[in-house]
Amino acid sequence: MTFAVGFAYMESEKTDNYHWALGKLKQLITKQDIFPRVILTDREFALMNAIKDIFPHTTNMLCTWHIIKNVNARCTVQIPKDMKQKVKNLWRDVVESPDEVEYQQRLNAFQQACVNSSNFVEYVNNTWLAPHKEQFVEAWTNRVMHIGNTTTNRVESAHWRLKKMLEHSKGDLCKCLEGMNDNIRLEVDKIKKSFQKSFYYTEKTHSSPFFQYLRNFVSRAAMTLISDEMERIDIVGTNKNLCGCKLRSTCELPCACELSGYTTNGVPIPLDSVHGHWKKLTMEEPLEDDTEDGYELDMSNAMEAIWTRFRSLDIVGKRALKSKVFELAYPASSSLCPPPEKIKTRGGVKNKNKGKAPKGYDVYRDPSYFEHVEREYGDSQGTSKRLCTQQSQSSQKELSQPSQKQQSQPSQKQLSQMSKKLTSQKYLGQFPDHMHPHIVDIADVLEDGNCGFRAVASLLGYTEEGWSIVRRELDEELRNNNNLYEKLFRQDLQVVRDSLVATRWFTIPAMGYLVANRYNVVLVTLGKPSKTFFPMMTSYSSSARFFCIGFVNGNHWVPVNMSKGFPLPEVTADWKKFCSHEARSWMSNLNGRLQYWNLLNPPVKPLSGVMSVE
């Protein structure tokens, strides 16, 4: 799995800045034997130089995906059309060369195919092969333990998830720290979940007696890699040259020739043959210090120096020093807080020469060279969404037959819209008829017992995978305002508390109160009956958000996107009984929308007597 160990703000991307960031990272590592063996980057010389200085014994690999894309882009421009695909395939073969002998043979074939394109060959040799071949060609990279990571795609995917948490680039520092913290918490929850699966779940391919020493002690991912490697036993046997031992060198797991020896002797795979990286299935293991005498951790001289300086300062200096020490000693009492009002920011620096930013982005990034080439030449292997859209539009203009038009693939946005439309049709009939005109669309979330928390997380912008954050924050809300909820839930208080700790259902009205109070939102639940939950401790705010979730199939919650000004169902009686005086302003300011509901759906009055009709 990929996870973040830290985030850094840097003034610029220069060697000194990277020196600082990597130096801070190195300070966090308490054991010499867990220094990174491999650091994977793009060809960014400032970062590469900093890595050499801070981690001199670490192998710096380069992203093969970006290298192949850049070389293919040059190929598109400089190689004749009938030779382009052949040259691209030969270049990929060069990058994937298993050993140095094979590398030289494939390189000769590649250069022979490009004999009439000297500029292209010169670019490949001078830019990539001569200075960097040991950093991306498999003949050299397969000698280090990189656990199968040869591209930076995972990092970019993790960066995308963080940007989803941050929402935009105009937030204050506290907002950014909160998003980063939520991102790390989500990753920690996923890692712990994967650990539990390795402890308690056994896949069919891992049930073989050869895995009996590894089950519950080695991660499922490692056993899957070993299981896949066992399929090569019949081909390579115990011949190391034929095997290549790639899995042993890149992942420190038994390769085919080793596994062949175990199967021939009829013995299970020993636990010692697996690197310790794959055997760490807990996050609770305490870290040990490398220092023997504790000298590096001794703070007595530093503390004495602080006292000496404190005594020599005037009253203003003493107050300033005291505040700094207090922030270190009591981090929970930090004076940091978000700005009282939203600050108007101008966003990213605009440059008229760069063109307009794509729709949906608040900052603009200069496209890479290969993106310019793909846009210009229409590379069939490009993955740019914009390119796909252009190709689809041009094909519709050129092809006149309906059957040919239908062959164009829908975009990701169109697929998402189609999915929402199908979901809306599936669940719409389960909501009150008078609300149908006000429902924009209905999304869906995973049905796993946490669907209510997933629906709220989706509306908060966490994505549904942020359900564990919502559960934890609602538990904090319950503990922080215990006096209110003791009155509100009475004898059911412990039941509500248990439902937030264990995997329980999202129950209404209890969770409705917690969500509205924690996030200061108006929560509307559509079902039988439909209810509105206002915050109970804060006064009305015109900028407050309205969340709507629907109860369907008798056991499932889904997020519902409503039109602006939709009618609000009745407020619960307990809200009116226990809310603060300030909170009653919600009722007075939104009374029109409450009356609108009653107008569309008048309450049924009970009959005063019994009437029979013959």
Image: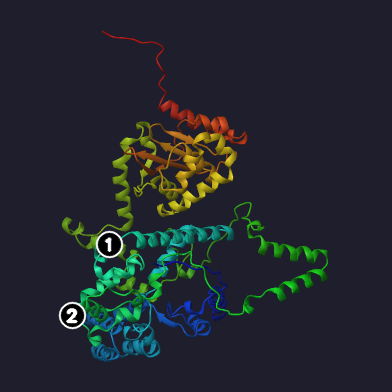
Residue 358 percent coordinates (x, y): 42, 62
Residue 235 numbered mark, or none: 2
Residue 89, how many percent across, how many down?
24, 80
Q: How is the image coloured?
A: rainbow
Up/down of 333 relative to 248, above or below: above
At 32% across and 58% down in the image, what residue appears?
Answer: 412
Residue 380 visible at all: no
Instruction: Name the residue type under label 2.
Output: Ile
Mark 2 lies on a secondary structure that is helix
Q: Residue 308's quadrant in the figure? A: bottom right
Q: How many marks?
A: 2
Q: Mark 1 is on which residue type?
A: Glu
Of residue 50 and residue 356, the one placed in the foreground of this image is 50
Give the residue at x 26% y 7%: 614
- Percent coordinates x, y for residue 212 in the rendering: 29, 68
Q: Which residue is mark 1?
A: 203
For disc 2, the neighbor class at 10 Å (few under 14, some 14 to 19, many from 20) is: few
Instruction: Tell which tag, 2 or 1, sits nearer the viewer.
Output: 1
Q: Quadrant of residue 150?
A: bottom left
Quadrant location, the N terminus: bottom left
Local packing at callout 1 (Cα closer than 10 Å; few below 14, some 14-19, many 20+) is few
